[in-house]
Amino acid sequence: MDTKTLWIISAIGLGVIGWVLQRGANSLSRRTLAQVAMAVALAMVLHQLKIYRLPQGGSITAGSMVPLLLVAWAYGPWAGMLAGLVFGMMTLMIGGYIVHPVQGILDYPLAYIALGVAGFFPKHQFFGGAMGLCGRFFCHFLAGIVFFSQYAWVGWSPWIYSLALNGLFIFLEGGLCLLIVRLLPLDRLINAMRGMAYK
């Protein structure tokens, strides 16, 4: 990919990050921000509990995206995107792998910001969660095509390689998260979170 395209992607990515920070900070109460911080802390703990680490990168965790999805459903998409942004930056700081700044933007803040899309579907949580996961997949998929194509197996195009690798990773990680969501008393949890934030 040429330098101009990389600059455009990075400008868009940084613009989205700034937009999420501005909207999240201005539209959320201090109590809600405190709830977001607690959800991010829980997500970080779950992220450290690796069920399986994939050989080409990525790992299956003990449902680390569930708290981020809950924030999006309870407080709306801006809270979910802000939680995703903070989680992505913390993940980057404690063990991220960066080969290029644009890849870092795609794989960390933007991929997790995308989970906040679930907040646009508070009444259709499973669909919203799937949409958030699709957004996360797209960010990893794009980063894989552009920056990790040299690792593609012999005879595989970068597109197919990134689709297969990231598809498997997101399918397993996201599938586990959606299964956990299905098993949780979701409405009660969301109502309890809202009650704590708005007291």
Image (tube, rainbow, N blue to C red):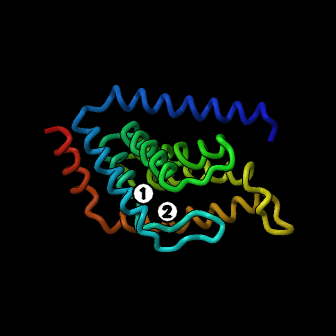
Residue name at image x 71 percent, y 31 percent: 7
Q: Which residue is mark 2?
A: 174
Label 1 to label 2: alpha-carbon separation: 8 Å
Q: Is residue 142 above or below residue 152?
A: above
Task: Check whether the beta carbons of the residues at disc 1 and disc 2 lie within 8 A of each other.
Answer: yes
Q: Earlier in the sequence, mark 1 or mark 2?
A: 1
Question: In the figure, is residue 99 to the left or right of 86?
Answer: right
What is the quadrant of residue 76 in the picture?
top left
- Label 1 is placed on what type of residue? Met
Question: For the N terminus, which image quadrant?
Answer: top right
- Label 2 is placed on what type of residue? Gly
Q: What is the secondary structure assignment of the residue under circle 2?
A: helix
Mark number displayed over residue 65: 1
What is the quadrant of residue 57 in the picture?
bottom right
Question: In the figure, is residue 191 to the left or right of 135?
Answer: left
Residue name at image x 48 percent, y 43 percent: 113
Q: Residue furthest right?
A: 155
Q: Is residue 154 visible?
A: yes
Q: What is the secondary structure assignment of the residue under circle 1?
A: loop
What is the quadrant of residue 187 in the picture?
bottom left
Residue name at image x 39 percent, y 52 percent: 69
Q: Is residue 69 above or below residue 22?
A: below
Nearest to the observer: residue 134 or residue 26: 26
Question: In the figure, is residue 163 to the left or right of 183?
Answer: right
